[in-house]
Amino acid sequence: MHIEKIHHVAYRCHDAKETVEWYVNNLKMDFVLAIAEDQVPSTKEPDPYMHVFLDAGQGNVLAFFELPTKPRMARDPNTPEWVQHIAFRVSDMETLLAYKEHLEANGVDVLGVTDHSVFHSIYFFDPNGHRLELSAPDPEEAAKLKRLDAVKWDMLEEWSKTKRAPKHAEWLHSKEFTEEPS
């Protein structure tokens, strides 16, 4: 018995049409399908909704619910905005930089490129306030992932006891913390 893959990940949105158009235009995702009901099938609660699905590549599906009868969604005030995010992988650094240019040309504020050693990322927000990340693998990704794999359990154990960042993989962000911002 095992999980095969994620079927879809669902988030809330303010406006289903705006959200679909934003993802189609900015991230080049295909609009897969829409489901709308006046009642929730699982709970039977009377609550109209629009549920939209977008193709995030390779069988990955990103979905959103618009809930017009509910109060506007808010962020969890106890969680920093950088924590909860959706990260998408792109093929290489050239593609990542092309997306950065495309997003900025569409008026999207983009943070980065951030060097995570194993991969390189840019960050931005969708029109609903969800933080998104696009990541490109580092050319030495496989070797670096092997180094991380060798220390993961030791790091987790140390963290669980001390709640301080273990130093087993401090090399990951050494460039980000030592280089001058460009």
Image (cartoon, helix red, strand yellow):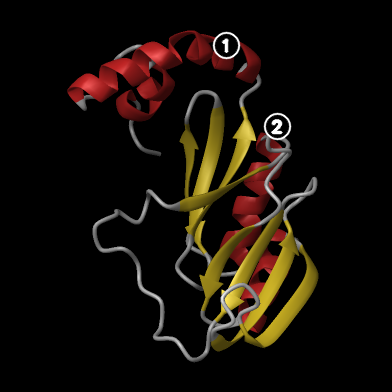
Q: Which residue is labeled 2 in the image?
A: 1
- Labels 1 and 2: the sequence-earlier one: 2
Image coords of residue 124 (percent x, y): 49, 57
Helix, strand, or loop for circle 1? helix
Q: Which mark is residue 146?
A: 1
**What is the number of callouts on the image?**
2
Q: Foreground: 64 or 36? A: 36
Left of 105 or right of it: where is 165?
left
- Give me the residue at 55% from left, 14% from top: 144
Task: Give left or right: position of 169 versus 42.
Answer: left
Tell me the number on the disc at residue 80: none
- The residue positioned 57% from the left and 61% from the top of the image is 104
* Residue 56: image location, x then y, percent: 72, 54
Residue 58 versus residue 162 in the image, above or below:
below
Give the alpha-carbon distance from disc 1 to disc 2, as whole Å: 27 Å
The local crowd at label 1, few if under 14, some if 14 to 19, many if 20 or more residues have their Cα within 10 Å, is: few
What kind of residue is marked 2? Met
Residue 99, relative to residue 166: is it above or below?
Answer: below
Residue occupying the point 73% across, 37% down: 91
Q: Nearer the viewer, residue 111 or 22?
A: 22
**Which quarter of the figure has residue 17?**
bottom right
Say whether residue 97 is visible: yes
Q: Amino acid at mark 1?
A: Lys
Does residue 170 show up? Answer: no
Nearer to the camera, 134 or 76: 76
